[in-house]
Amino acid sequence: MVMTLPILYSLQNCPYAMRARLAILLARQRVMLRPIVMKNKPAKMLAVSPKGTVPVLVLEAETEAGHGAENYDLKLNNQSIIDESLDIMLWALKRNDPQDLLRSQHPDALPEMLKIIEENDKQFKPSLEQYKHAKRFHEDTEEQYRLACEPFIQRLEQRLAQHEFFMGATPSLLDYALLPFVRQFSKVNRQLYLNGPYTHLQHWLNNQLQSRLYAQAMFKYPLWLDTHQEFVLGE
């Protein structure tokens, strides 16, 4: 049976789509990228994922062929799509993890990372959105929402004061899952961020943003609905 590549619907600057693209590249997987914008969502994407958010990964029928199925703990149950960014990251890295981003030899590491990612997604991200909104519209709640973001950012700074990456001397899933959100935080009030007590976080973020990986993940392709061209992302 000829296997077609999975299809990834993605939005250029969406942090969730960014983390999915990063993981696919890190796992050396290949997908057909379909760049979209939220104001013009493709009917084909909505047909497979009615919630209408990105990223959406439409899979090949690989589990039926048994390819790596025994390694998945994502509870996919032969579903044909994955439409949560963290699940896409795990899908890719369960297939291939050359940098051991999941810390396979340390059983406590993945649960710890998933807990921090959940805190990012459920607590930090809502505060970050309020901070961004208040800054954009010059509201007097800007400082309130910035302070709501601070405890999470400070804990990341404390981790980086101990070692080069969030989980130790080498990168992990946690670094790439949080990267798009730390990037957003750094841009809201740029001067305040640069003057703030984030020496280690600034160094970490600068290194990430200047990397070849980030440049690959952020390469801007034409919109799929404009050209109906797909692009291979990954190796």
Image (spheres, rainbow, N blue to C red):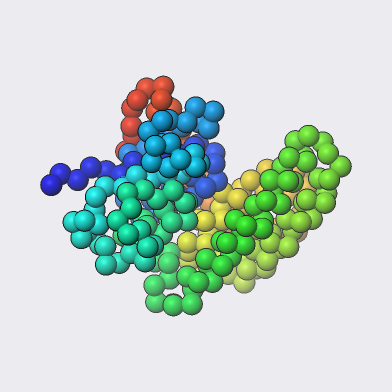
Determine the residue positioned at 73% across, 49% down: 193
- Give the vertical position of 177 relative to 167 (above or below): above
Q: Position of residue 221 (x, y in %)?
A: 42, 31
Q: Is residue 150 visible?
A: yes
Q: Nearer the viewer, residue 147 or 219?
A: 147
Q: Position of residue 83 (x, y in %)?
A: 44, 48
Q: Position of residue 148 (x, y in %)?
A: 76, 56
Q: Position of residue 127 (x, y in %)?
A: 71, 52
Determine the residue positioned at 48% across, 64% down: 172
Is residue 139 shown left or right of residue 221? right
- Give the vertical position of 128 relative to 118 (above or below): above
Determine the residue positioned at 73% across, 46% down: 130
When asked about the image quadrant of residue 73, the answer is: bottom left
Q: Nearer the viewer, residue 234 or 207?
A: 234
- Give the vertical position of 198 relative to 213 (above or below): below
When asked about the image quadrant of residue 56, the answer is: top left
Q: Nearer the viewer, residue 221 or 77?
A: 77
- Give the vertical position of 63 relative to 229 (above or below): below
Q: From this viewpoint, which residue is outermost toward the right?
A: 140
